[in-house]
């Protein structure tokens, strides 16, 4: 999970943990891509905020991850960038517009993992 706001990190982390997922939380796209590229841990899905501090946005993180694994499940979270999903988002991804209920996130990840 990529989220740079600590308060949201905690909410999203808790929701996914309670939903039965093991997860790693990072604050930057570079960290997320490096961890997936390394192959040390086999990650099953990416949950990323779209508008992150730093040079890399969620759209770019997802495209780089899809170069590694074209079927990798992606869930985007955004408050302001939802209108850009059609042009910037990767195919077969889910976008959750903030604020969303924690259960919506768990459902989105589960849905992508079950169809992937």
Image: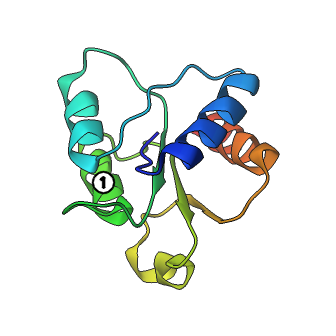
Residue 106 lies in what quarter of the image?
Answer: top right
The residue shown at (24%, 38%) is 31
| Residue 62 against residue 107 in the figure, above or below | below
Q: Is residue 12 left or right of residue 48?
A: right
List x then y, in percent, for residue 34.
19, 34
Label 1 sits on a secondary structure element that is: helix
Numbered disc total: 1
Tell me the crowding category of disc 1: few under 14, some 14 to 19, or many 20 or more residues within 10 angstroms, Cα based.
Answer: many
List x then y, in percent, for residue 50.
43, 64
Please say which color scheme the image uses: rainbow
Q: In this view, does 114 lie to the left or right of 46?
A: right
List x then y, in percent, for residue 67.
24, 49
Q: In the rendered view of the protein, which quadrant contains the C terminus?
A: top right
| Residue 87 against residue 101 in the figure, above or below | below
Q: Is residue 58 left or right of residue 83?
A: left
The residue shown at (24%, 40%) is 33
| Residue picked out by circle 1 | 61
The residue shown at (24%, 52%) is 64
Specify the farthest residue to the front.
7
The residue shown at (40%, 67%) is 51
> Is 5 or 42 nearer to us in this picture?
5
């Amino acid at each position: 999970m990529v989220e740079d706001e600590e308060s949201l990190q905690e909410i999203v982390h808790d929701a996914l943990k309670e939903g039965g997922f093991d997860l790693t939380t990072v604050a930057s796209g570079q960290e997320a891509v490096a961890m997936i590229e390394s192959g040390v841990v086999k990650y099953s899905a990416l949950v990323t905020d779209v508008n992150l501090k730093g040079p890399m946005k969620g759209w770019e993180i997802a495209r780089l991850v899809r170069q590694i694994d074209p079927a990798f499940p992606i869930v985007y979270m955004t408050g302001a960038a939802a209108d850009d999903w059609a042009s910037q988002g990767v195919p077969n991804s889910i976008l959750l517009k903030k604020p969303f209920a924690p259960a919506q996130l768990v459902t989105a990840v589960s849905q992508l993992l079950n169809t992937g």
